[in-house]
């Protein structure tokens, strides 16, 4: 099995050592950084398939690292958040994290989350370019444009947009959208889908005539308005 390069940014050296051993047996090659500035530099200069980012870091905290990283990179990112700090998770999703996991975490669940992120990033669509109105997406690279303007979407936002654009004008319920685009079912208190869609709607903006591009039917799902 070819190793998948993973970057973990966490100041807990014992945890990094344990995860290096555990993930190594699962076909991952783990690279570690122990503070925010070092992690940001490594993330910018390295070629990683997934980044694992802790919220609490010395110096530059994880949320600031995420904010700076998302200015130029859409590498899939899983954020680690201490139990009892839901605000950090919500902020992480707003800033562009693709998934989050509470610490301490079960290594088996972490592996499952990493594999789900990798499957999403490597999935291809039948059509290379999908366009509805003035919005188009390259289904392989997940690059998105509105007219001639490139839109800096995260991987999760682009996958959600691709799923919606495949069915313009059709209602897609929340669970189906989450499973097809994010590769997971939603728990009763899981707000990740709502946060990603809120970010996506903000970045897309409205149609030139003022109509929303994504209509929300509360409790039912979402429709891409063409």
Image (cartoon, rainbow, N blue to C red):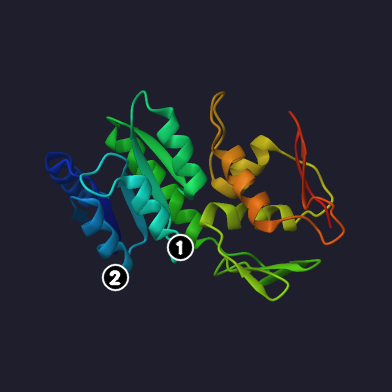
- Give the class, few, some or many, for how many residues have Cα within 10 Å of label 2's Cα (few <14, many ≥20): few
Q: Give yes or no for contact between labels 2 and 1 (Cβ–Cβ under 8 Å).
A: no
Please report the residue visible at 17 percent of the width from the left and 45 percent of the height from the top. 16
Query: As drawn, is 48 to the left or to the right of 122?
Result: left
Discs 2/1, front? 1
Asked if one can make out residue 27 in the rendered structure from this viewpoint, the answer is no
The image shows residue 190, relative to residue 226, as above or below, that is above
Element marked by disc 1 = loop
Please report the residue visible at 63 percent of the width from the left and 45 percent of the height from the top. 197
Q: Quadrant of the C terminus?
A: bottom right
Seen as rendered, the residue at the extreme right is 209
The disc placed on residue 71 is 1
Q: How many marks?
A: 2
Element marked by disc 2 = helix
Query: As drawn, is 7 to the left or to the right of 141?
Result: left
Q: CA distance from mark 2 to mark 1?
A: 14 Å
Please report the residue visible at 63 percent of the width from the left and 44 percent of the height from the top. 198
Residue 149, image quadrant: bottom right
Query: As drawn, is 111 to the left or to the right of 117?
Result: left
Q: Position of residue 43 (x, y in %)?
A: 31, 62
> In this figure, which residue is indicated by the disc labeled 2?
45
Towards the viewer: 183 or 194: 194
Q: Position of residue 41 (x, y in %)?
A: 26, 64
Residue 206, image quadrant: bottom right
Please report the residue visible at 21 percent of the width from the left and 49 percent of the height from the top. 25
Query: As drawn, is 78 to the left or to the right of 190?
Result: left
């Amino acid at each position: 099995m070819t190793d998948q390069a993973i970057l973990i940014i966490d100041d807990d050296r014992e945890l990094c050592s344990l995860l290096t051993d555990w993930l190594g047996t699962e076909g991952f090659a783990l690279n570690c950084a122990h503070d925010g500035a070092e992690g940001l530099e490594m993330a910018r200069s390295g070629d990683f398939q997934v980044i694992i980012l802790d919220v609490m870091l010395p110096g530059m905290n994880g949320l600031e690292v995420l904010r700076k990283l998302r200015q130029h990179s859409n590498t899939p990112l899983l954020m680690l958040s201490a139990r009892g700090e839901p605000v950090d998770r919500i902020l992480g999703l707003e800033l562009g994290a693709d998934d989050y996991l509470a610490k301490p975490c079960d290594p088996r669940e972490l592996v499952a989350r990493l594999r789900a992120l990798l499957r999403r990033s490597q999935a291809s669509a039948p059509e290379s370019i999908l366009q509805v109105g003035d919005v188009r997406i390259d289904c392989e690279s997940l690059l998105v444009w509105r007219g001639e303007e490139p839109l800096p979407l995260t991987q999760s936002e682009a996958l959600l947009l691709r799923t919606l654009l495949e069915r313009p004008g059709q209602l897609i319920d929340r669970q189906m959208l989450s499973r097809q685009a994010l590769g997971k079912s939603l728990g009763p208190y899981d707000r990740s889908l709502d946060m990603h869609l809120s970010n996506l709607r903000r970045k897309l903006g409205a149609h030139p005539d003022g109509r929303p591009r994504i209509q929300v039917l509360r409790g039912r799902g979402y429709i891409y308005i063409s």
